[in-house]
Amino acid sequence: MTNSIRQTRAKKTQRFSRRKMLHGSSALAAAAAIGSGAGAQVQKLVRPGEKRAQRDVFVQVFLRGAMDGLTTVVPHGDPDYYAARPTLAVPPPGQVNGALDLDGFFGLAPAAAPLLTPYQSGHLAIVHASGSVDPTRSHFDAFTKMEFGESGLPPGTVTNGWLARHLIQVGATSSALLRAVGADDILPQTLAGAPNALPIPNMGSFLFPGDPSSAVERVALLTDMFAGESPPVGPTALRTFDSIDLMSQIDFAGYVPAGGAQYPNSRFGDQLRSTATLIKANVGVEAITIDYGGWDLHAQLGPLDGTMAAMLDDLTRGLEAFYIDMASMLNDVTLACVSEFGRRVAENSSAGVDHGHGNAMLVMGGGINGGQVIANWPGLAPAQLDDGAVAITIDYRDVLGEILERRMGATDLGAIFPQHVFTTHGVTI
């Protein structure tokens, strides 16, 4: 621990006693989860055409439950889509509740209209018929395969998350106290083993737990106790205490989004708002992950006025607000929405769609070659499907690898995604 932190410990913990403490286990769990190493400070904005001197902050939104990419990004130019979904298909452009045309073949569901803001500005790319080539259609197996970046590899080939491996790789040039945040009670597998990473479910309430009246004494006692512990326990605990201090100095509650951005009044909206606040605080955080669950809609999909439509409205209004809010730093941020797999093409008898394979990724940022749907479309005729689902023609690792290499300073993609042969699809500029 630095002398400056030690000297200001008592002063900082006084702030804890004046604020509502976090009564729970998040901070204690963080002490066990945070790793070793440090992170790169966020640099000044790099304008287009200038040489980049820093890495993008990466934001991952994991759409858990298998988001239906055929509703979100409608292949209205493929007649087999309408044959397979006689009651659940989003109508083609020009009809009532029709898709919002993007390129003459693909369109957005009406509920996803807010995506037009970054798309038409050239900062949102959609990568369709993409995903993990592993054949599993189990959510939990797919989570592990995708987050560990081990599609098609024997179990145990890798033991940490793909984003963790990236942070380890670039860590030699890093110096930040807190490098990565998982906006949940536990770190996602994407960040498993990441250096200086913490699970923080509510960034504005990440405070030292327990009774405020004894916070100062307990912080001092624990600091002295862990200061003598050998690595990794001692340094890990002290960095966790310091990270709590760091987060307590950021005014999450008083943050005013830029550009008139209006985040939805939802958990996801709050998470993105806090993400923007944290990035703009310039404390060196390099990666933030957000989980958005509830997409496993086997029954009553509701693409136009039901559950799917409501979730798309929340998701895309949040993404639009984040895009507007981060305009001044857009060249320093890349956001990617991923899901473990998509849904089957044909609707089922419960007005829903079952587990599929290929899906649509959403990638947004100042360094993204947006305003296009990137796809090697496989077709939706029965003979063209992968066991009733969209066939994958773009591996998600290609997309992430391009972002890592061109926007995030990765130098050895083979160490991040072992045994994968990369293909570039022009996702970044």
Image: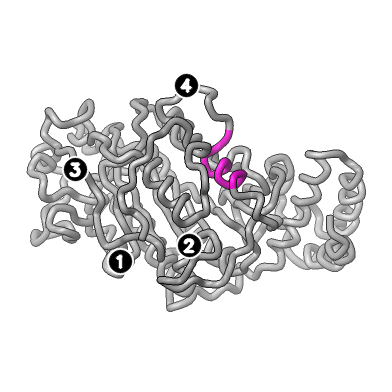
Three-letter amino acid code at the position of disc 1: Gly
User: Distance from label 2 to label 1 (Cα)?
Assistant: 15 Å
User: Distance from label 4 to label 3 (Cα)?
Assistant: 29 Å
Q: Is residue 118 left or right of residue 382?
A: right
User: Distance from label 4 to label 2 (Cα)?
Assistant: 33 Å
Mark sitting earlier along the chain (3/1): 1
Seen in the picture, residue 149 relative to 276 is either above or below; the reply is: above
Residue contact at pointers 4 and 2, CB within 8 angstroms? no
Mark sitting earlier along the chain (4/2): 4
* Mark 1 surroundings: few (<14), some (14-19) or many (≥20) residues within 10 A: some
Mark sitting earlier along the chain (3/2): 2
In the picture, the disc for residue 333 is 2
Residue contact at pointers 2 and 1, CB within 8 angstroms? no
* Residue beneath the point at 11% across and 59% down: 93
- The kind of secondary structure the magenta stretch mainly shows is helix
Q: Find disc 4 in the rendering and name its residue.
A: 154
Q: Position of residue 316 (x, y in %)?
A: 35, 59
Q: Find disc 1 in the rendering and name its residue.
A: 122
In the picture, the disc for residue 377 is 3
Location of residue 139 by image quarter: top left
Three-letter amino acid code at the position of disc 2: Val
* Mark 3 surroundings: few (<14), some (14-19) or many (≥20) residues within 10 A: some
Q: Position of residue 306 (x, y in %)?
A: 27, 50
Q: What range is drawn magenta here?
A: 160-169
User: Distance from label 3 to label 2 (Cα)?
Assistant: 28 Å
